[in-house]
Amino acid sequence: MPPTAGLGLKPQHYADALAATDEGLWFEVHPENYMSAGGPRLLALEAIRGRHPISLHGVGLSLAADANPDPEHLAALKRLADRFEPFVVSEHLAWSTHRGVHQPDLLPFPRTHAALARIADNIDRMQEALGRKVLIENPSLYLPLSGHDLEEVEFLKALVARTGCGLLVDVNNVFVSASNLDYRAEAYLDAIPAEAVGEIHLAGHGPDAGGSDLLIDTHGAPVAEPVWALYRRLIRRIGPRPTLIERDDDIPAFAMLMAERDRAAAELGALEAVHA
């Protein structure tokens, strides 16, 4: 059965993931955690890959930086993709490196025509190095930036048109950004080109610890009901897509994450039944 709903794989859940037999279950990993010559993590991932599909979701290529992607990073990603044959490889529309300095975050940028050309070139380099199409994820935004030439959806559409890449739509990111920047999440999702969407992410968010009205994309809470509502709206328009439950902080027991995963699988199953 092709992948339906999956989970971000965490080391504390290796045994549970290996034992799981749910149809359509898949797991996503950050490749940067597995770019080694050997060791127990790679062995665990190899065992899990023998039973379930996996995807690679990069966090370190810094595609929106004012420089080419690190060739050594690309080479390591290529080796990992060749070994584990993920059904999807994805990266973020963000930057995290500048002149050799690495920032521990996925940072925004002005969506100018110059940025579009540079990022499209970096995506081309990534796809050429891997020999495959990749998906690009929409960011979480917290404060308005000046200097944009293009709205975010238009920027994403232009990247797809120029590079042939696909999109990873993070519905929680859309909800968080829309709340923080005061626009309608529904309108954003309605404008996403259906044919470009290869994967969907669902995650939790929380309030700013500093006491402001900002929402923070924490990945440390269950998926909120408004995000589930946006997800249903999206898949009813574009059809079923592989959907991931992300949890990177305050990680609960495997069974609790599987309950959220099963909810997403049920939404996808109901949609497939309607279109059968």
Image (spheres, helix red, strand yellow):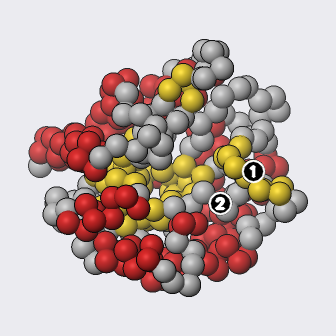
Label 2 sits on a secondary structure element that is loop
Q: Is residue 5 above or below residue 212?
A: below
Q: Quadrant of residue 150?
A: top right
Tell me the CA gap for discs 2 and 1: 10 Å
Q: Is label 2 or label 1 in front? A: 1
Tell me the tag on residue 60: 2
Q: Quadrant of residue 209?
A: top right
**What residue would you read off at disc 1?**
103
Q: Which of 101/61 is in front?
A: 101
Residue 192 visible (yes or no):
yes
Residue 94 % position (x, y): 68, 48
**Callout 1 crowding tier (Cα within 10 Å): few <14, some 14–19, many ≥20:** few
Residue 237 % position (x, y): 33, 37
Identified by mark 1, the residue type is Gln
Residue 201 visible (yes or no):
no
What residue is rendered at 60% in x and 71% in y? 127
Q: Residue furthest right?
A: 99
Q: Is residue 116 above or below residue 271?
A: below
**Callout 2 crowding tier (Cα within 10 Å): few <14, some 14–19, many ≥20:** many
- Left or right of 106? Residue 10 is left
Q: Which image quarter holds the N terminus?
A: bottom left
Residue 271 % position (x, y): 19, 41
Q: Is residue 186 above or below residue 3?
A: above
- Left or right of 125? Residue 68 is right
Identified by mark 2, the residue type is Gly
Label 1 sits on a secondary structure element that is strand
